[in-house]
Amino acid sequence: MRAWQFEAEGKPISLNEIPEPSAGPGEVVIDVKASGLCHSDIMYMAIGASTMPFLPMTQGHENAGVISALGPEVTGWAVGDVVGVCSSGVRPPLGMFTPGGFADKLVASAPDLARVPAGLDLSLAALATDAGMTSYHAVIKAGGAAEGMKVGVIGYGGLGQIGTRAAVLKGAEVHIAEPKRDVWELATAAGVTGCVADADEWAGQSFDLVVDYAGFDTTQKAINAVRRGGTVVQVGLGKPTFTILTHTILGRTLIGSLGGTVADIEEVFDLLAAKEIEPVFTEIGFDEIGAGLERLKNNEVIGRLVARFGG
């Protein structure tokens, strides 16, 4: 079968032919129908060789498809079920520590499966398993966004657009910091109160919560924006390291949020199916995954890229 694989640091992702996988105990084989592209893919291509258990590694951690085979001891699932896969569950993360979904088929652990509601577009289902899960968990579960809170979201991209809307739906007053002014209209339509190009403009404005989906030079700016007793949730991995001024964190909370749960994914599925969240995304073909990652790397994407293939 076909698979896009990371082979070595500094080398572009490669399209290879590899053997088809089989399901072991507690596992299923999924015919992949949609797989989202993520900045994390680029980060691991830059610095991930030392952390991956083997190379080449089939990438792709944002996946939806149809179960085509069941391993022993799998209950509650059947061949033909349409599922998304949680990338931060029982199985080590897909596309980073176990083979992912930039391939015709992937193997997943049954406890990591999220049931896709009838009628939900599979591109939306795929992006919900990471962009949806990660952004939703960060702002709602880790950050506790609620009615009456003043919430800042740094980065209105693939994750930020979903996290922003989730906070709006909870009744929060939501502001975004996003240098791409051409997405401000989308943010306003999603219920955002205010838009700025740089989170520096929020300094001293007493936000209750700021969620940083960017992770470039933004963490300090987030800390500067929250009140004493407020919280910054770090999600973005734009840079592998960052520095903060020690005294600015005193009286504030900085936490990291990584991934989420199957329950988070299914909650996002329901919001997508009800059209309460309508993220911007662009579909590409399987053969365009390599070029799509370059577009992400060059900051040429609005919203999310999702590869659709396999019928």
Image (cartoon, rainbow, N blue to C red):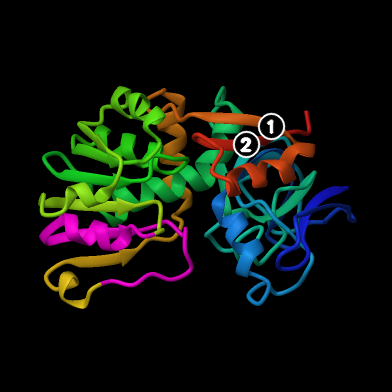
Label 1 belongs to which residue? Answer: 284
Residue at the spot 58% in from the left edge and 61% down from the top edge: 43
Question: Where 305 falls versus 236 (above or below)?
Answer: above
User: Which x, y percent locates residue 250?
Assistant: 14, 73
Amino acid type, label 2: Val
Residue at the spot 44% in from the left edge and 51% down from the top edge: 134
Disc number at residue 184? none
Residue at the spot 20% in from the left edge and 52% down from the top edge: 209
User: Which x, y percent locates residue 237?
Assistant: 46, 60
Magenta segment includes 141:
no
Choose the circle earlier in sequence order: 1 or 2: 1
Q: Are marks 1 and 2 in contact (CB under 8 Å)?
A: yes
Q: Which portion, as a residue range, is magenta?
A: 217-244
On screen, residue 29 versus residue 234, left or right, reads right
Element type at mark 2? strand
On screen, residue 118 versus residue 137, left or right, reads right
On screen, residue 167 versus residue 137, left or right, reads left
Could you tell me if residue 79 is visible in this image? no
Within 10 Å of disc 2 (Cα), the crowding (few <14, some 14-19, many 20+) is many
Label 2 belongs to which residue? Answer: 306
The one of 255 and 267 positioned closer to us in this rendering: 255
Magenta segment includes 228:
yes
User: Which x, y percent locates residue 285?
Assistant: 74, 33
Residue at the spot 75% in from the left edge and 38% down from the top edge: 288
